[in-house]
Amino acid sequence: MADRAEKLVCNSVWKLFGAGAEDLLKRTGGAPTVEQVAEGGLIGAVRDASFNVLEGEIFVIMGLSGSGKSTLVRCMSRLIEPTGGEIIFDGNDLLKATANEMVELRRHKMGMVFQHFALLPHLTVLGNVAFPLEVQGIDRGTREERAREIIELVGLQGRESYYPRELSGGQQQRVGIARSLAVEPELWFLDEPFSALDPLIRREMQDEFLRLQNVLHKTIVFITHDFDEAIRLADRIAIMKDGAIDQIGTPEDLVVRPATDYVAEFTKDVSRAKVLSVASVMSPAPRRKPAGGYGGEIPVETKIGEVASRMSDGDKPFAVLGSDGKQVGQVTKDAVVGVLIQG
């Protein structure tokens, strides 16, 4: 991801609730302590949050209830006004944008999906998906044509005339996703979009989300409290605690190299087979192929849990291929079993 451009950058973002919040930031040089925030009778919902989101990346922000993750994502779109800091989108500081400029950005460049679907009950699926385009003033024929394309993309073709009450929970969430995509956003915010769904439907929606991302390559900020969901979807994860970011890294970084006791505790029950790639256990490719050949080929980024079943019936090593399709190493059954035994 090193060659990707920065799409969104947050520098020392604060959200303090209570009277005198901005004055406290000024008096403390923009860096009040937890004690100073408490002494001022304020609530530090977001404290000194700094990170970047790369173009085409799925950046997951997670934490327990009350950690500040939903407040932070609303600060990024200025649905909640930050108390201080910088939020740079495409090189421009959003905190310096006027209210009208923010409205236009949300209409044309930002997509948002929340836990509660907030569909308009008096509109059909087609009407709900086309609604943001209607707000933009796009003519009916054009907006409905675009809406039908998105409806097909999210797998709801044939249900254009249905009303929200006639849809399942998973189908309603697909409508919410389609509506947010209708404006072809450059930046897509999703705040716990699947948490209200049953486990099976939630898994299906995660699959659908990954399929859409493979097609659309959006820049995504995704909020969740579920670590299994985070490691399945994320390129990188930021873990929040008490309004502050404790650590940012890949799922593998967080599980294998936790920076704080909190992150270690947060990730301790996660199966390493879900987060470790074969790159972490492969050995260099031999000059000659093994006597019995290879049992198969796997990409270097494949998770160990995914390859374990393929290796269970034989003892042949697997050739590990890089992004260019060339062999970069090999992985043995013993190496995979070793991770599985570790848990």
Image (tube, rainbow, N blue to C red):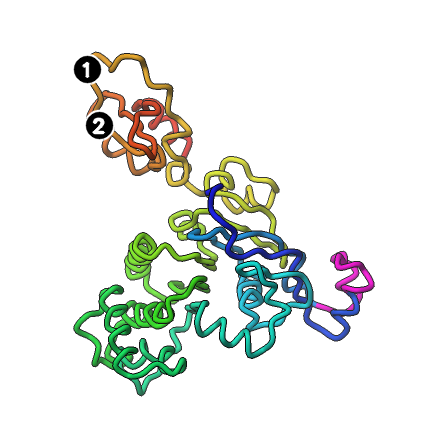
Q: Residue furthest right?
A: 27
Magenta stretch: residue 26 in it?
A: yes
Instruction: Provide residue 188's location: percent of width, then percent of height.
Output: 43, 63
Q: Nearer the viewer, residue 290 or 97?
A: 97
Name the disc covering residue 240, or none. Answer: none
Q: Secondary structure at mark 1?
A: loop
Q: Which residue is mark 2?
A: 296
Name the disc covering residue 292, or none. Answer: 1
Q: Nearer the viewer, residue 162 or 217?
A: 217
Image quadrant assignment for residue 259: top right
Query: How many badges with numbers are in the image?
Result: 2
Q: Residue at x 75, y 59 (%)?
A: 30
Magenta stretch: residue 283 in it?
A: no
Badge 1 amino acid: Gly
Q: Nearer the viewer, residue 235 or 143?
A: 143
Instruction: Provide residue 297's location: percent of width, then percent of height.
Output: 25, 29
> Which stretch is magenta?
25-42
Q: Residue furthest bottom?
A: 122
Image quadrant assignment for residue 151: bottom left
Instruction: Provide residue 195's location: percent of width, then percent of height.
Output: 40, 63
Q: Secondary structure at mark 2?
A: loop
Q: Residue at x 60, y 49 (%)?
A: 246
Q: Residue at x 48, y 72 (%)?
A: 106
Q: Nearer the viewer, residue 8 or 240?
A: 8
Q: Is residue 203 visible?
A: no
Q: Quadrant of the C terminus?
A: top left
